[in-house]
Amino acid sequence: MGIDPGTNLLGFGVIRVDGRKVSFVDMGVVDMRKEKDHFSKLRKLGREMNRLLDIYAPDELSVESPFYGKNPQVMLKLGRAQGAAVTAALLRDIPVTEYAPRQAKIAITGVGAASKEQVSNMICKILNVDLDPAYLDATDALALALCHYFHEISPLTRVRTSGDWKQFLEAHPERIK
C-alpha cells in the first residue's frame, strides 16, 4: 500500500504483488478539508488509516516523505500527517518504507521533475487500468507503492556499498567476464 499524506487530502493506492506480477487493487482519497482544525484532521486521518489497514491488510506500506517548500509550517503539518499514517501501520507491525517524491517520479516516469499528470498516465500504462485523473493524490500513492515494488525486485537495491566497485564485484562474481 502506498500513502501520499497531506493535510487536506490523503491519497492511498493498493497493489497486489504475486511473484513478479503486479496488479491494481484500489485507490482513493481521504478528504479532510471539512475538518475544523489540524488536530481534527489528524484524528480523522488516524481513524481512516486504521479502516484502510483493516480492509486491505497490506504486507508493507510505502509513504511519501515530507518535502521542504517555501513555508516551513507546511512541512511541519505534512510531517504530522505522515507520522499519523506511519504510526497506524507500525502499531500493526507493518513495515514502512519512505520515498522522496522525486524517487517515486523517477521510478514511474524516469524523470524526477515529472508532473502529477505524467505520473498518473504512466501508472495507467504500467497497471493496464483506466484511472480517473481527478484523483492525482491517489495515483501519487500508487506511484509510491509501485516505487517500492520496483525497488524490491531490482537486484541493484540488494547491493549495499558506497560506490565501491571492488566490493560490488566481490559480491557478484558472476558479473565478471
Image (cartoon, rainbow, N blue to C red):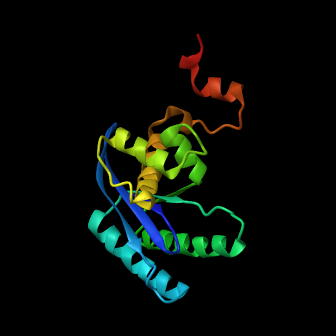
State the residue in front, 64 or 72. 72
Place of residue 74 in the rendered image (x, y in percent of width and height, measured from the top left)? 64, 73
Quarter of the image with the N terminus in it: bottom left
Camera-side residue: 34 or 92?
Answer: 34
- Up the image or down, 68 lies above or below 34; here it is above
14, 133: nearer the viewer: 133
Image location (x, y in percent) of residue 161: 67, 37
In this view, 148 is above or below 170? below
Q: Position of residue 78 (x, y in %)?
A: 58, 71
Front residue of this view, candidates 176 and 55 = 55
Quadrant hosting residue 13: bottom left
Farthest residue toward the bottom?
Answer: 36
Residue 14 is drawn in which quadrant?
bottom left
Residue farthest toward the top in the current orientation of the protein: 177
User: How many numbered discs sit on the rendered protein?
Assistant: 0
Which quadrant holds the C terminus? Answer: top right
Residue 43 visible at all: yes
Q: Residue at x 50, y 67 (%)?
A: 5
- The answer to whether residue 159 is above or below residue 130 is above
The picture places residue 145, in percent across and down from the top left corner, at 43, 52
The answer to whether one can see residue 61 in this image is: no
- Is residue 146 left or right of 127 when viewed as pictured? right
